[in-house]
Image (cartoon, rainbow, N blue to C red):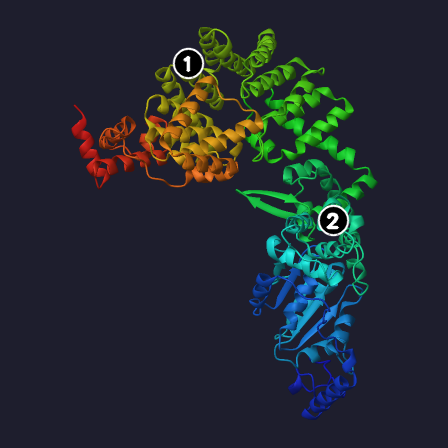
Amino acid sequence: MTAAAATCVTCGNPLTEAAAGRRYCSNACRQRAYRSRTSARIETTSAVSFVPAPLDSFVGRREELAALARTEADRLVSLVGPGGAGKTRLAIQHASKRADQTWWTPLASASDVVQAIFASVGAHPLPNGSARDAVVAEVDQHRRPLLVLDNCEHLLSQVAAVVVELLARCPRLRVLVTSREPLRLAGEQVFSVGELELEHDAVALFRDRAISVDRSFEVDAANVADVVAVCRSLDGMPLAIELAARRIPVLSPADILARLGDRLALLTGGPRTADDRHRTLRTAIGWSYDLLSPEEQGASRRLAVLGVPFDLGVAGAVCGVPDALELLTGLEQKSLLVVDRVGGHTTFRQLESVRLYCRERAVAHGDVSLVADRVVEWVCSLVEPEISSFFPAPAVALLLDRNVGLLELAAQRTASTGDWSRHALTIVATAWTSTPRGPRGAPTELLHQALSRPMPAAYRSVLAVLAAMHHRVRGGWHVTRRFAEESLAIERADARRPGTTARALEVLASAEAHTGDPSRAWELFDEASALLRDSNDKLARAILLNSYGWTLLQHGFPNRAAPLVRDALTLIRLIGLPHMLNPVLHTAGAIALARKDFVEAVDLFRESLEVGADHPMDQFYDLEGLALGLVGVGADDERALSLLTSAGVVRTRFDFRAEPYWQALLDDARAVCRDRISATRLRAAESTGERMSLAQAISYALTTQPHAEDPADGAISARELHVATLVAEGLTNRQIGQRLGISPHTVARHVTHARSKLGLRSRAQLAVWAGRQTP
């Protein structure tokens, strides 16, 4: 109100000009107001809302409580998370630890925020004053008051307006909000409440709630794995875990785990005293879903059909919008999406319970077929433009790798509708992709079934050459040749696709080298090289050169292979694709092995293991190469044997058969290890290799280890000598790497090894030494 119209809040008389800006006309009125409020508080003690006192124990969240304790300087803190995450319980635990005045305002069933706060703080109506004025008058009497507003998501606009006013008028007030989305106010500190820590807090919560309904229950060695799996499947969400634990009187943890596919029916029967929204998992999720806009509900349903993480592009295609940013932002803020950031790439996913609920809604709305068709369209839009290439563009291959989970949905949809042309494209996409858990390529049966269907000739050619490559890594050389010849025949008849023609020639050449006339193989490689010579596709040329070099090496021509592989390395480094270095570094390492330069081989295979971390299934070859180098150096036979054994497990599991040349090297290395290692240590090394996962074997391989001295009484290797002479010329590590086709990191290792062997203390001393060696 303006100063001219201001009146005393006790007697109602107009305030004088001198009293403008005050609330009382005199000290007497101020005292009467104080006595009135005191008397009202005494008379209405039962109306004051204290912090609730739960009957069950609080489990976990130690880090969250500690972090909340550090927010005392923040005036507005919002605990935000999905339904059933335990926001209310965390707020109770935090608020109950405070010694200062705290008011708890439950809003789940409220419709008027101001009246709910008025009741919770025990405010007394003021003459000629509003309910807001009464709340302010009460709050202002306390030194460090905290107002908790619980369950605000359905009243966000009201809550936001009231909070802004109260914080402005009560400078000592702090507000703690629990909601499924933030208020989005200036100065708001958003505190995300997510899943419980699985290995400890989630299991402890399950145990605590299970014991409350079955005193005989205990988590022990026999059931702990099932309990952890239940908690993980439930995304570590406290409400879901508590509801699952309440089934313990009639179901074991294993039984509960087996039934979680129908968790919305299983997870019911919350405590009678619980809020209606927390008595079943379905109602908890439904509360959030019902608060969404129609557009957000539609997006939630359609994204749930995917069943895998997705990025913005996929979300836009599935939801039928040019840009899904606003949709996904809204769903994330409402705690219905989880954002994951790995390697600079952002993906989104729904918690599994949320996804299952939304998928039920998708079925009811007829969205499942719509989503499948849109996924097919998205996959085909990526694959079709690349169908005539030697190798798909790296950006396309990477995008398919990141969304490999969608390809099965696309393949199933096209097969079910008999759309065989687009089915072929989905199988091509599958064959182009890899995952950390499995090898690159489509399964044999899927490739063969696709090839039995009608499709355009260009699609058949690509599928045939992919089938040939599939059988090549499994040692089926005659089948490889048959599929490669089919692809090449289609390409020669068309003569318009040099990329796919060169690919068919490359695969057929490698098959001919192993099953036919090697001289014809070199002719086929040369023909493929001629097709790509004037191409701007540096990646295709690098892959072809590496394949040519690898095949030459296997037939006893390491010196002919070396310049081809060096050029391939240079091309890959120039186009900046570290993950594509893996096969070329392997061939370079194999050439170093053939030349008896074992230290160089060890360095190359270690670098290959380092750069190929995104595709670990491609790295079993490098484990073998590193082991061969270690055996040659004589550095660590037990480590070498463990690596050989671990790689052998991968070969057996996926039926990857080594070429005769490579297999002979592996057999010789194992024989050397058996001769040089005692029987006990040999068994231990093999047992270690058998037990290690591929990721563990790679980590073990990259553990720093000393190189043994070279045989020639401290003499440096030929490659180290070459590097030293280039150092003497004044070249930097980067310049040396570009000249030799190796990384600057590898050059640095060569320099270090050479200095160590020669007893030199600086790069300058190495340059002087190398200069003296030049005739």
Q: Residue furthest bottom?
A: 28
Please tell me how crowded label 1 is: few (under 14), some (14-19), or many (20+) other residues with Cα within 10 Å.
few
How many numbered circles does the render carry? 2
Of residue 434 and residue 454, the one placed in the foreground of this image is 434
Residue 576 appears in the picture as rendered: no
Residue 260's x, y, as percent? Answer: 74, 46
Horizontally, is 675 left or right of 465 in the view?
left
Residue 62's x, y, as percent? Answer: 59, 63
Image quadrant where residue 104 sits: bottom right
Above or below, 248 against 257 in this view is below
* Amino acid type assigned to the residue bearing label 2 in the image: Ile
Please tell me how crowded label 2 is: few (under 14), some (14-19), or many (20+) other residues with Cα within 10 Å.
many
* Amino acid type assigned to the residue bearing label 1 in the image: His
Of residue 129 and residue 305, the one placed in the foreground of this image is 305
Of residue 472 and residue 297, the one placed in the foreground of this image is 472
Q: Nearer the viewer, mark 2 or mark 1?
A: 2
Residue 424's x, y, as percent? Answer: 67, 21
SS for callout 2: helix
Image quadrant where residue 496 sits: top right
Horizontally, is 116 left or right of 437 in the view?
right
Q: Which mark, residue 555?
A: 1
Mark 2 and mark 1: Cα distance apart in space:
58 Å
Residue labelled with disc 2: 256
What residue is at 65 percent from the left and 72 percent from the top? Answer: 96
In the picture, the quarter occupied by the C terminus is top left
